[in-house]
Image (tube, grey):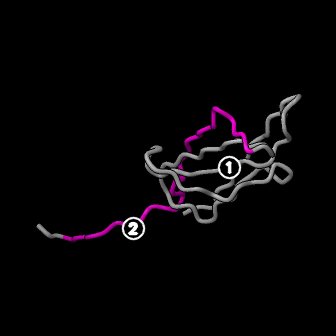
Amino acid sequence: MRDTLILWDLPAPNEFGSPLEAVEAQISADAGANWSPLPDIPASGLQQIFLEQQPFGDWIIRLTVRDTAGLTDLNPVETPFRVEDNSPPSSVTNVRVTFD
């Protein structure tokens, strides 16, 4: 497992639209077949998610912008990423010594 930080930039609000309220975040471990919600990130805060001790494997993060009127963007961004195991390899096993 590894700590993982995901960052992004917010779009400019629509000129005549409502102010941006938050980014809705979801994560998938099975290529997008199932999604688990993460806490919303307020538009006024840091645009990042810190995933503590994220398990190794392939993941997809989905980010959707929501405005104060409750409207969400029509094209949520889905970004795949891999949490790789960066630990050293294990030791050899089953060492045998034979004589001729």
Q: Which residue is outermost to the right?
A: 15
Residue 71 belongs to magenta span: yes
Lateral position of residue 21 relative to residue 64, left or right: right
Disc number placed over residue 24 in the picture, else none: 1
Q: Position of residue 50 (x, y in %)?
A: 69, 59
Q: Label 1 amino acid? A: Glu
Mark 2 and 1 residues: CB-CB less than 8 Å, in contact?
no
Q: Which residue is outermost to the left?
A: 100
Q: Secondary structure at mark 2?
A: loop
Lateral position of residue 85 relative to residue 17, left or right: left
Q: Nearer the viewer, mark 2 or mark 1?
A: 1
Lateral position of residue 42 relative to residue 62, left or right: right
Sequence-wise, the earlier of marks 2 and 1 is 1
Residue occupying image coordinates x 14% and y 70%:
99
Q: Decide: is 49 above or below 81.
A: below
Mark 2: few/some/many CA within 10 Å (<14, 14-19, 20+): few
Residue occupying image coordinates x 48% and y 48%:
58
Mark 1: few/some/many CA within 10 Å (<14, 14-19, 20+): some
User: Magenta span covers which residues?
Assistant: 70-97
> Nearest the camera: 50 or 77?
77
Quadrant in which the N terminus appears: bottom right
How far is the residue under mark 2 from the one under mark 1?
A: 43 Å
- Where, by quadrant of the figure, is residue 60 drawn? top right
Residue 73 belongs to magenta span: yes
Q: Label 2 amino acid? A: Ser
Residue occupying image coordinates x 65% and y 44%:
63
Q: Secondary structure at mark 1?
A: strand
- The secondary structure that most of the magenta stretch takes on is loop
| Residue annotated with mark 2 | 91
Lateral position of residue 20 relative to residue 65, left or right: right
Residue occupying image coordinates x 63% and y 37%:
77
Disc number placed over residue 74 in the picture, else none: none
